[in-house]
Amino acid sequence: MIVIGAGLVGSAAAWHCARAGASVLIAEAGHPNIGASGQNAGSLHFQIERRFLENGERLAEEAARITAISRIAIADWAGLETALGEDLHVRRDGGLMVAETAAEVALLERKVAREQAAGLGTRLLDGDEARRIAPYLAEGIAAAGFLADEGHADPRAVTPAFVRAAERAGATLRTETEAVAIARQGGGFAVTLRHTGREETIRAARLLIAAGAWSPQVAMLANLHLPLFPVALTMNATERVAPLLPHLVQHVGRRLSMKQTHAGNILIGGGWPSRLRRGTGGAFDPALRPEPIETSRTENLRAAAATVPAVADMNLLRSWTGVTAITADQLPLVGEVPRMPGLFVAAGGSAFTLGPTFARLVARQMLEQDRAEADEALAMLSPARFEHLNGFMG
Amino acid sequence: MTRRIEQGVERGSRITIFVDGAPVAAFAGETLATALIASGRIAFRRDGRAALRGLFCNMGTCSECFVQTAVPGRAPRRLRACLTPVADGMAIETGAGPDG
């Protein structure tokens, strides 16, 4: 098997495949964890994301289906540090999604009702109840959805741990190794890899594209469309402070996520944009570091201070930008491409929180082990829903 | 030994700041970093492993030069010494200790 991309999902899938006995090669164009896997702020968020709520009820209803995957991911994260034998700074003291205005409270109530119907253990708290659990919250917080399973982990630790586990299980990692051609051969693929100018063609029965925002370009080598679009985000870190914020904090009406790292820094993000840069061909190039947008930083910090007033007194240590990818319908893209049996993809956002689960399930599909169960769990994320785009491709 | 340029320089008024409790002479218009370095103090803080840290970028980016305010009765705050102008009577702590 060949896995393209040594991010969280690729290295985790390689681990699962290698320890099941498969011969696995991971081809990484740069170095492990350099993309969204290592650039995100490490939220383990299982409540329905704000981005699914801000575009009307119909999308929210559809997106609520992702809670089925979230429930599996909650169980996967619970065993991850033990399975990998490493400290990933996984902390799951719960997460609060807060609301301030009456409209936000109403939105939160509908969201929590949806989650409860889907079997998530979210509880609706009023402002005072929320402040009893989270005394750092502002007086203006009128309600919160609390989910005990939420928390955070260290993005700088998780992918390297998966890479090491994959290598221990027998997988081979090639860094600075770019896929430059993919051809169908027999029932499988002939993948040409380029490293320091030298090309080598390797046969594989199964191919997994787990290259994050680069995935569409990799799929082009197989003459396939993947409807993934790069998006550039902004994250911020404060100085280290004494333990203040044990939870993940999000906001139902504002773009905000907050958590305190093991070292003590408060990480502040929540989906504020930065500006994608274009490559020489004119298309967005995810390899170029996006340009910061000043108002993203100021509005993000304003939302943080309005929610957790103590951060107003903290020094901002740094802000950074990173690239992830979203699909045309906002749901991730995980599974086999019907047009090209044997070619799998796992990309498309939420892949820190849900990445270990995407990897485990797509590995089941690739290995043909408990495949029906994996197919069912991933059905809503299957590339089959975009098959019309590949009607003239392949 | 002074580290300040003495010839052809106009300075603000002479003031006193307090560093780890000790009076340190400075001039209005200088930054805390300037006053600390001029007084021979190159260690500004200790990091999470208790190692000494000091001025690095001198332009507000790296945050290596954090010092703490020492105002009686108020919680200490971290300041970037390289961006913070001195003020008469200002009191800061470096945490650097006797080996700093």
Image (cartoon, rainbow, N blue to C red):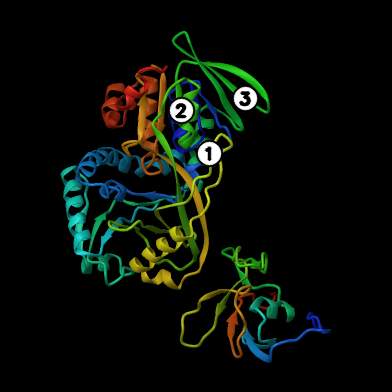
Residue located at (51% from left, 41% from top): A35
- First of labels 1, 2 by sequence position: 2
Residue A134 on image: x %, y %: 30, 66
Labels 3 and 1 touching (C-beta < 8 A): no
Residue situated in front as seen by the camera: A236 or B19 = A236
Q: Amino acid at mark 2?
A: Ile
Establish whether labels 3 and 2 are both on one chain.
yes
Q: Residues within 10 Å of mark 1 (few under 14, many from 20)?
A: some
Q: Nearer the viewer, mark 1 or mark 2?
A: 1
Chain at numbered mark 3? A
Image x and y of residue A269, in percent = 41, 56
Q: Which residue is mark 1?
A: A285
State the CA–CA distance, disc 3 to disc 1. Answer: 20 Å
Disc 2: which residue: A209
Instruction: Tell which circle, 3 or 2, labels the residue nearer the N-terminal end.
Output: 3
The residue tagged 3 is A194
Q: Secondary structure at mark 2?
A: strand
Q: Position of residue B66 (x, y in %)?
A: 59, 71
Distance from Cα at disc 1 to Cα at disc 2? 18 Å
Q: Chain of mark 1?
A: A
Q: In terms of secondary structure, where does tag 3 sit?
A: strand
Residue type indicated by callout 3: Arg
Task: Name the residue located 22 percent from the left edge and 59 percent from the top edge.
Answer: A104
Quadrant location, the C terminus of chain A: top left
Q: What chain does mark 2 sit on?
A: A
Q: Classify A106 as above or below A167.
A: below
Quadrant housing residue A172: top right
Residue furthest top in the image: A186
